[in-house]
Image (cartoon, rainbow, N blue to C red):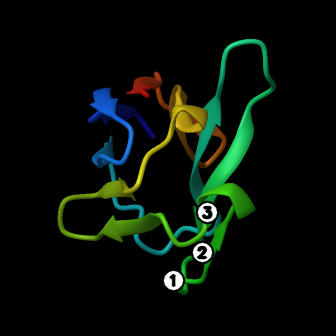
Amino acid sequence: VQLQASGGGLVQAGGSLRLSCAASRNIFSLNHIGWYRQAPGKERELVADITGLGITKYAESVKGRFTISRNGLKNTLNLQMNSLTSDDTAVYYCLIESQWGQGTLVTVSS
């Protein structure tokens, strides 16, 4: 599967961004597709994951602020990020079937 991530950018603290990962084929029924992030000097970490049944899992630090979803018609994996803080600054990657997207940079200014 080929992936193209988009939606990153610069936002002020408290703001919102929506990331999207476009896949080259249908991803709706796949298990454990998700978003990860890597901040400078830190290891890559799971942000959110969704199963083929739509069961979601979130990192504690983003619960209540981020929402992962997938669109079966557009073959996209999305991440709605609200109430952003400087701690959310990182490169965000989608992961689908062991394939990483190219990463999209999110910078939150305080």
Residue type at the position of mark 3? Asp
Quadrant hosting residue 77: bottom left
Task: Report the amino acid beneath label 1.
Answer: Gly
Which label sits on residue 49? 3
Please indicate whether residue 75 sits to the left or right of residue 43 in the image: left
Label 2 and label 1: CA atoms lie apart by: 5 Å
The N terminus lies in which quarter of the figure?
top left
Q: Nearer the viewer, residue 57 or 87?
A: 87
User: What label sits on residue 35 in the rendered view?
Assistant: none
Query: Which amino acid type is marked by label 2?
Result: Thr
Secondary structure under the numbered disc 1 in the rendered image = loop
> Mark 1 and mark 2 in contact (Cβ < 8 Å)?
yes
Image quadrant where residue 22 sits: top left
Between 13 and 59, the residue placed more toward the observer is: 13
Residue occupied by mark 2: 51
How many labels were placed on the picture?
Answer: 3
Neighbor class of circle 2 (other Cα within 10 Å; few <14, some 14-19, many 20+) is some
Per the model, the C-alpha gap separating discs 3 and 2 is: 7 Å
Residue drawn at x 70%, y 48% is 46
Q: Which is more toward the observer, 48 or 16?
A: 16
Task: Determine contact: label 3, label 2, CB under 8 Å.
Answer: yes
Residue 13: image location, x then y, percent: 39, 39
Residue underneath mark 1? 54
Q: Secondary structure at mark 3?
A: strand
Residue most extreme to the front: 110
